[in-house]
Image: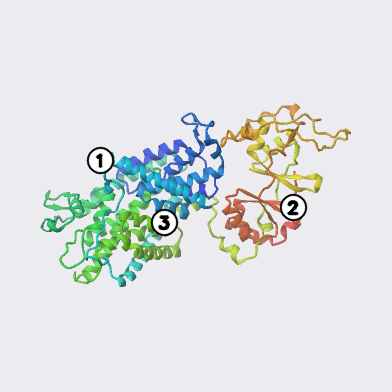
Amino acid sequence: MAAGSGIPEVKCFLNGIDLPRVVRVKTLLCKVLGVSFSVASGLPCGKEGPMVHSGAVVASGISQGRTKFWGVDTSFSKFSDFRNDREKRDFVACGAAAGVCSAFGAPIGGVLFSLEEGASYWSTKLTWRAFFCAMITLVTLYTLKNLDSWWGQANIEKLFSFGEFNSLSGEASNFSIWELLLFIIVGCLGGLIGACFNAANEHLTIWRMTRVNHSKTRRVVEVLVVSMVVTTVSFILPLLWWRCTDLPNDIMDWMTNQEKNLVEALVPYQCERNVQYNEVASLIFTDADVAIKQLFHFREAGQDDLATFSSAALFIFFLPYITMATFVYGVGVPSGLFVPSLLSGAAFGRLCGHLLHKLDHDSGTFADSGTYALMGAAAVLGGMARMTISLTVILLEATGDMQYVLPLMLTLMAARFTGNVFNEGLYDIHIQLRKIPFLEAEVPSLAEHHEIVAGQVMSTDVKCLRPVERAGVVHDLLRSCSHGTFPIVDTSSGGTLYGTASRSTLCTLLQRRAFGQPEALLDEHGTGSLGPRRLSPLVQWDAIEKVYPRYPTIEDVDMAPGDRSCWLDLRPYANTAPYTVNETASIQRTYRLFRTLGLRHLCVVNHNNQVVGIITRKDLMPESLAASLLRGRNAHLHEVHTLT
């Protein structure tokens, strides 16, 4: 569970899918330690995706106020008010925003990331919660990063940043208006590269799922083999680069301090130190953050500017690096996608800018190659992840330069549209490969083109209970099926829906023996029918919710033979106002109600408020909708509904 970036898992959790061990403390420890070693090993991976997952785990733990791993429990405090699925989901969304903020130093981008890529349900309350969480994250970063200055003037360079972008021509922008068309072309090419990356990684993931992932030993061997191959290639590529390039010492006088620091970071591999440097080694052997800044900030605007990285060096770095990133994403180590995409995209964008200057014979017609590097980084990352709004703001906050608002918007939109022609985003692909019933924001296209009603897609195998039921009947029902919720129908009024009871509540009541004697609810005349008298709640609701989320299971219940005939009064514990939909409701309305509210089940009733079926998440998947078309609109009317 700790392998990969964790963003697909967080998306699924916020979509209403309860994946096991996603937000456990053990997962957090493995994630943090694993990503530390994977990034330090030199693998083409980043820490940003795992930090999003880590933030979600921390937020989930705070909302619970306790952990079984550490033996901490704060039930006496206000944390107990947050122990429910709704609050836990909101906290995880805020944690994802905090993770993006800590990775990029972009609080607004983190909030928008949680909105665009994470939460399926959003509200004004959740907006300010996420904003407040991102704000506190940034305050913590400022405090920890500037302890050496005793909280004086903050050193912005210590936070994640793409460096300082300055206008190269006074008050004017670093690009011409007509170059926006070229940025759109770069975006289309980046979308194509992202689509190829996603397709290749999809086939690799399918191969891993069939050949590797079922064995722990094979997963470890795969990690070792991939690490050895990446290390070998990373050393061979600089060796194959036959040329040493002179350091730009003659123009150091008019360089900024930022450019001087980047020049000092150039690697003299197989070259004379302090005189020459190896172009390929300077991109591979330096930290990814430094390499990205080198591609962004070394000037190359034609005329007399020096080309720090040649076309051949950029191509030799770009193609093997993005290929290795394709193999690394999906192995059994925590790894992110952002930094490899940004670095490879920056190399691709700078290559485009360099070629344009060569075609122009270095006359300075086109923008600086660093501008094209920024557009290339956005294009490749957008082509892989298919993010637009949040990624635009994240990149703007990382650059700190508003002149790139429109170019980034156009580039990311072009990358998204181009990539969507061929396949979906990488996170969505991995969700589909794991066969997780993820509900997209839009209703499946099949439902838009056909008239489908709720009665066609619902499951008619409904297991129902009476408001007052024998303990043995409830016990046998729980053992015979794995349903999570059971409708409660009032047989005295023709089987109308009374409410619903969750599996966890029923198991808790049976375990605590919250039932009365066989004659406790019989009428006074001894006819054997149930009277109007109620059993007072034998278990308080706070006691049931106290064990959330580790409720007892039916295997934990020991039912004595003498207890089977006892009465279990479900009326004090039933949800008497469950969400329902009529059997004639359109599938569009049903789908939006189910997804927006984050439901796990939806009762389907007829015009007499009688339960005729139930809809779960799997019933709304495109495959189930396609099968419902074969059954016809009125097929459910001819089926026999057995209410147990």
Residue bearing mark 3: 390
Which one is closest to the eye, mark 1 or mark 2? 1
Q: Quadrant of the C terminus?
A: top right
Mark 3 surroundings: few (<14), some (14-19) or many (≥20) residues within 10 A: many
Q: Mark 1 is on which residue type?
A: Ser
Along the polypeptide, which appears first: circle 2 or circle 3? 3
Question: Looking at the picture, how far across and down is residue 136, in whole percent?
Answer: 40, 44
Measure how far apart labels 1 and 2 are at the Cα level.
Answer: 68 Å
Mark 2 surroundings: few (<14), some (14-19) or many (≥20) residues within 10 A: some
Q: Mark 3 is on which residue type?
A: Ser
Mark 2 and mark 3 residues within 8 Å of each other at the beta carbon: no
Measure how far apart labels 1 and 3 are at the Cα level.
Answer: 32 Å
Residue bearing mark 1: 149
Can residue 316 be seen in this snapshot?
no
Is 392 left or right of 271, judged from the image as shown?
Answer: right
Along the polypeptide, which appears first: circle 1 or circle 3? 1
Q: Mark 2 is on which residue type?
A: Asn
Q: Quadrant of residue 559?
A: top right
Question: Looking at the picture, how far across and down is residue 256, in whole percent?
Answer: 18, 55
Measure how far apart labels 2 and 3 are at the Cα level.
Answer: 44 Å
Is 550 left or right of 409, judged from the image as shown?
Answer: right
Q: Secondary structure at mark 3?
A: helix
Is 616 left or right of 148, judged from the image as shown?
Answer: right
